[in-house]
Image: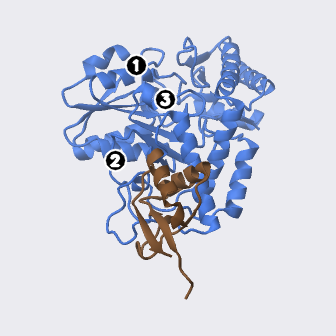
Chain colours: A blue, B brown
Amino acid sequence: MIYLDSAATSFHKPEAVADAVYNAIRHMGNSGRGGHTASLSAARVIYGTRKKIANLFGVSDPAQVVFTANSTQSLNMTIQGLFHAGDHVITTAMEHNSVLRPLYRKEQQEGVSLSILPCDACGTVRYDLLEEYLQPNTKGIVCTHASNVTGNMVDIVRIGAFCKKHNLYFVVDASQTAGVFSIDMEQMGIDVLCFTGHKSLMGPQGTGGLCLQKEITLPCFCVGGSGVQSYRKIHPEEMPTHLEAGTLNGHGIAGLSAALDWITETGMDNIRAQEQKHMRMFYEAVRQIPQIKIYGDFSQSERAPIVTLNIGDNPAEEVCDALAERYDIATRGGAHCAPLMHQHFQTETQGAVRFSFSYFNTEEEIQTAIQAVREIAEEWT
Amino acid sequence: MRKKELCFVVAFHTTTEALALEEAAHQAGVVGRLIPIPTQITAGCGLAWKMPITARADMEQLLQQNHLTYDASYELWV
């Protein structure tokens, strides 16, 4: 199989990740549930991973790194906790449903008002409208770092500066960029960074988290086992335990730890350069094929390694199925859980075919994919 | 009954605090180890750092210099 669906999950993981999960299952107990070797082993691995995440994202205190199951959970915890009746929140048309649905729920159930920044023809956010969208009760901006549909990046430095100027919370969804693009919460003015472990961070599914600036307090999303303060009726207030009720995914976090080591050893710049090379090679070839329509802004010097396209008016799912059945190429069709982006491009009915690239793809795989698109386009148009 | 000895014990709010102290202690060469929190401190769950009473000053210096957060410290027969 040629796997070109890395924006959904990284399929090719470093060997060390699988080894770490295996070793963790064999040797790790439950972190913070006892003082024996197995429990302490788990606690040390999890603490070490917290430190690595803190270091990666410019978080000064590892206790401000909270492990969750994925970005969706992190974004729900954040949006649920930060915004309340009477607040106004700005987001963008580039968002995934993991941002949109928690915000829609706030809008419908609590009376939070919502403004959605539109995009230009290429699907890039209209930064020029930010001031216009600001209201006296605007409390924050929630946005992705890169679109999972087009790969277009959001200038989070610019939006972070805007938030700082207007005293707004700035929440960033780094699902498509964590581990490959440099993110520094302090320098970029990010208040809450939500990430998943299983995409560009190369870790196992079921790992993710959020990083919080110290000034931000979120209510407990759920309460229960903490391994400390057992006779109190309320869940501990201290971070990160405050936001981590129940047993953590220690085995998965051990894998994430190994993935973070691999990223450090390989070099984020090297990983990104390789992914960009694969994306550009594919893009430059398929854009020459008649009947191909590509979505996104490829004038951006750096973008998430995604090329999303359609072949004439053919339904995206049929193209994906042909790629899978005839060439064993894995891509993703449909709406990509990003309805506003597809409405923007008027692809709600047709969908679009997303090719997303990895450090581990080979040039031969990219050439095979190009040829497959070429053949399908010739046959179907 | 097991023979007890007077020790210096540090209790924590969270497991993360305990692990941060363990790491700092190892780096600084301060003696001691993590143990289940003694019931004299709380009947609940958690970890504590146990060390000989003679090394108390080393730990107090470590806590201060590294700005380590913790719940409380005790002299206990454990």
The answer to whether marks 1 and 2 sit on the same chain is yes
Q: Cα distance, mark 1 to mark 3?
A: 13 Å
Q: Which residue type does callout 1 highlight?
A: Arg
Q: Is residue A283 visible?
A: yes
Dot 2 crowding, Cα within 10 Å, few <14, some 14–19, many 20+? some
Mark 1: few, some, or many residues within 10 Å (few <14, many ≥20)?
few
- Identity of the amino acid at label 3? Asp
Q: Residue placed at 44% from the left, 25% from the top?
A: A187
Residue A118 visible from this viewpoint: no
Residue A158, given in percent of the width and then of the height, sits at: 40, 19
Name the residue beneath numbered marker 1: A158
Chain ID, mark 2: A
Q: Secondary structure at mark 2?
A: loop
The disc, 1 or 2, on the residue closer to the chain's N-terminal end is 1
Residue behind mark 2: A218
- Residue at the (55%, 88%) spot, across then down: B1
Q: Nearer the viewer, residue A337 or A59?
A: A59
